[in-house]
Amino acid sequence: MPQPDLDEARKQHAALREIFYRGDGRLDAPLVRRVEALCRRASAAVDDAYCQQEMRLVAGYAAELFSEQGHHKYESQSLSGAEFLRLQIVKALDSFHSRLFSLDAMRRAAAMGVKPEERA
């Protein structure tokens, strides 16, 4: 059974993954605007507070990663601030993807008539 909202969210997630998993580390103003637009579309696709929070994190971290000084406050002895932010973005993207999987599984179970207490 097709689920257009989840399909759209997955499409936006895939585009975000492509940006942050390629690892060249460079964000410019147009790319940050694209990331923000992708995050907005992913959030709008699925009516789920957890997914929306993860996309807010991705957009916020991307803005800090791009900023001249914003990433410096995240620096530590073991990681640069930019690498820390990139890892947080990847973590949020993974959490978003996992939640989409869970939403899909819950919908499929509901469509088959499985009650929540019977799923465990």
Image: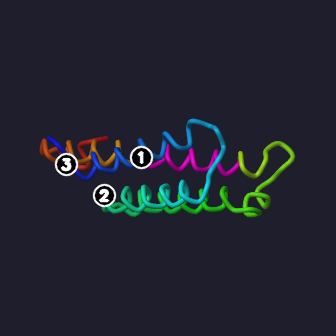
Q: Tell me the quarter of the picture where residue 78 sits.
A: top right
Foreground tag (2 vs 3): 2
Is 24 magenta? The answer is: no
Find residue 6 and report its horizontal and vertical position in percent.
28, 48
Nearest the eye: 51 or 25: 25
Query: Which kind of residue does numbered mark 3 sit on?
Result: Lys
Label 1: which secondary element: helix
Secondary structure, magenta segment, majority class: helix
Query: Residue at coordinates 76% horizontally, 52% vertically from top-left?
Result: 81
For mark 1, what is the residue?
A: 13
- Real-space Cα separation, disc 2 to disc 1, in angstroms: 11 Å
Find residue 96 and report its horizontal and vertical position in percent.
44, 49
Find residue 113 and report its horizontal and vertical position in percent.
12, 45
Q: Tell me the quarter of the picture where residue 42 sits.
A: bottom left
Query: Residue at coordinates 47% horizontally, 62% vertically from top-left?
Result: 53
Label 2: which secondary element: helix
For mark 2, what is the residue?
A: 45
Left or right of 90 on screen, residue 8? left
Q: Which mark is residue 102?
A: none
The segment highlighted magenta reads 84-97
